């Protein structure tokens, strides 16, 4: 997780300080959610999925997990932008 975040932030041109802050604020939450998902997925995989489909099943779970992470990041960004825009709109309405 940390390596993926590091690569993403470097591609975006952000500093290592931003990475540290992001890991500090989000790592525990993401890791707790991962601990909820992956053991359950493994149990289901070994108990119910035929051997020839186990890799495919875990790949699908991984795809769903990545989609969840991306969706949650987008929601946070859009909420942050809306709150910033809301403040700007309120200030412009006060000025008028």
Image (cartoon, grey):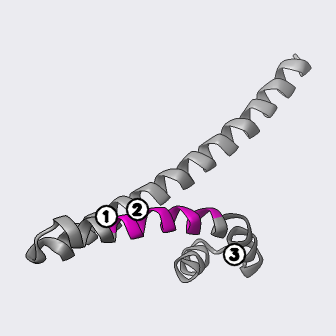
Earlier along the polypeptide chain: callout 3 or callout 1? 3
Q: Quadrant of residue 13?
A: bottom right
Earlier along the polypeptide chain: callout 2 or callout 3? 3
Write down the region rendered in magenta: 29-41
The label shown at residue 61 is 1
Q: Secondary structure at mark 2?
A: helix
Counting from the top left corner in percent of width and height, residue 94 is at 89, 19
Q: Nearer the viewer, residue 15 or 45?
A: 45
Mark 2 → mark 3, Cα distance in angstroms:
21 Å
Mark 3 → mark 1, Cα distance in angstroms:
26 Å
Counting from the top left corner in percent of width and height, residue 9 is at 61, 74
Q: Are marks 2 and 3 in contact (CB under 8 Å)?
A: no
Chief SS of the magenta region: helix
Q: Secondary structure at mark 3?
A: helix
Q: Nearer the viewer, residue 94 or 5?
A: 5
Q: Quadrant of residue 42?
A: bottom left
Counting from the top left corner in percent of width and height, residue 33 is at 53, 61
Bin the neighbour count of mark 2 within 10 Å (Cα to Cα): few under 14, some 14-19, many 20 and up: some
Q: Secondary structure at mark 1?
A: helix
Mark count: 3
Q: Which residue corresponds to the image point at 57% horizontal and 75% vertical from the top-left?
A: 5
As for residue 34 lying within the magenta part, the answer is: yes
Q: Which residue is mark 3?
A: 19
Q: Which residue is mark 2?
A: 65
């Amino acid at each position: 997780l940390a390596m993926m975040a590091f690569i993403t932030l470097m591609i975006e041109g952000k500093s290592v300080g931003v990475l540290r802050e992001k890991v500090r604020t989000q790592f525990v939450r993401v890791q707790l959610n991962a601990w909820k998902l992956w053991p359950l997925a493994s149990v289901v995989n070994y108990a119910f999925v035929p051997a020839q489909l186990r890799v495919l099943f875990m790949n699908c779970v991984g795809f769903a997990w990545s989609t969840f992470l991306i969706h949650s990041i987008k929601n946070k960004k859009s909420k942050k932008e809306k709150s910033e825009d809301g403040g700007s709109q309120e200030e412009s309405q006060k000025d008028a």
